[in-house]
Image (spheres, rainbow, N blue to C red):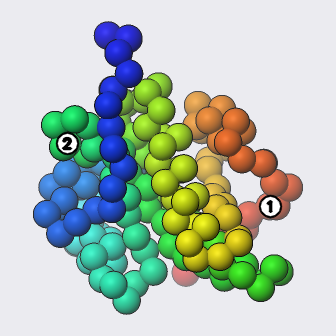
């Protein structure tokens, strides 16, 4: 179409489960991780629990349909003795990409980080996710940190 899609970013609310679910399912699918009902309900419960650090923002189109999500949490930045935000999950529907939705979600999360401290926003992505990295390289500094995982 070529038209820039109108979208707004807002926090996920109690009534957003069925709008959030297909986005989170597509995100899990991208990373080849199975999402069953139990796992979806656990993550949604974390998001809606005021005592859990995980929060979710949604990008919604002009009809109110969620087309993107950002899941993040406040984390301590011990080296600077302040707090920042870790962006755990970012996903935009394929048909909504290229319209600034991902950028808007990251900017929204960055604005939240300024409310909690001076640590800014950090995130990781898969090395093969080169499409997303074009946006990330434009918005943030690529670090030299190396990530490790120890299985449970």
Quarter holding the N terminus is top left
Residue that numbered label 2 is attached to: 65
Q: Earlier in the sequence, mark 2 or mark 1?
A: 2
Q: Residue 83 at x, y = what percent?
A: 66, 79
Residue at position x 32%, y 31% in the image = 6
Q: Residue 108 at x, y = what percent?
A: 49, 54
Q: Does residue 61 lie above or below 4 as drawn?
A: below
Question: Do the CB atoms of the residues marked 2 and 1 lie less than 8 Å apart?
Answer: no
Q: Does residue 50 lie above or below 136 as drawn?
A: below
Q: Does residue 40 lie above or below 20 as drawn?
A: below
Residue most extreme to the bottom:
51
Residue at position x 45%, y 80% in the image = 53
Q: Work out whether residue 17 or residue 146 is closer to the camera in this orientation and state it.
A: 17
Image-based side of 101 in relation to 50, left or right:
right
Residue that numbered label 1 is attached to: 146
Residue at position x 40%, y 84% in the image = 52
Question: Can residue 128 be seen?
Answer: no
Q: Work out whether residue 106 or residue 95 is closer to the camera in this orientation and state it.
A: 106
Quarter holding the C terminus is bottom right
Q: Secondary structure at mark 1?
A: loop
Residue at position x 71%, y 72% in the image = 118
Image-based side of 149 in relation to 71, left or right:
right
């Amino acid at each position: 179409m070529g038209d820039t899609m109108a979208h707004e970013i807002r926090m996920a609310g109690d009534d957003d489960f069925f709008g959030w679910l297909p986005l989170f399912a597509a995100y899990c699918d991208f990373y080849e991780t199975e999402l069953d009902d139990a796992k979806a309900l656990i993550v949604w419960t974390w998001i809606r629990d005021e005592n859990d650090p995980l929060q979710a923002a949604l990008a919604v189109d002009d009809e109110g349909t969620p087309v993107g999500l950002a899941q993040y949490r406040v984390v301590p930045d011990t080296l600077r003795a302040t707090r920042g935000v870790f962006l755990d999950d970012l996903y935009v529907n394929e048909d909504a990409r290229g319209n600034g939705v991902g950028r808007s979600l990251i900017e929204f999360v960055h604005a939240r980080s300024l409310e909690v401290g001076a640590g800014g926003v950090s995130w990781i992505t898969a090395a093969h996710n080169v499409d997303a990295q074009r946006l990330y390289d434009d918005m943030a500094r690529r670090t030299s940190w190396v990530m490790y995982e120890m299985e449970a």
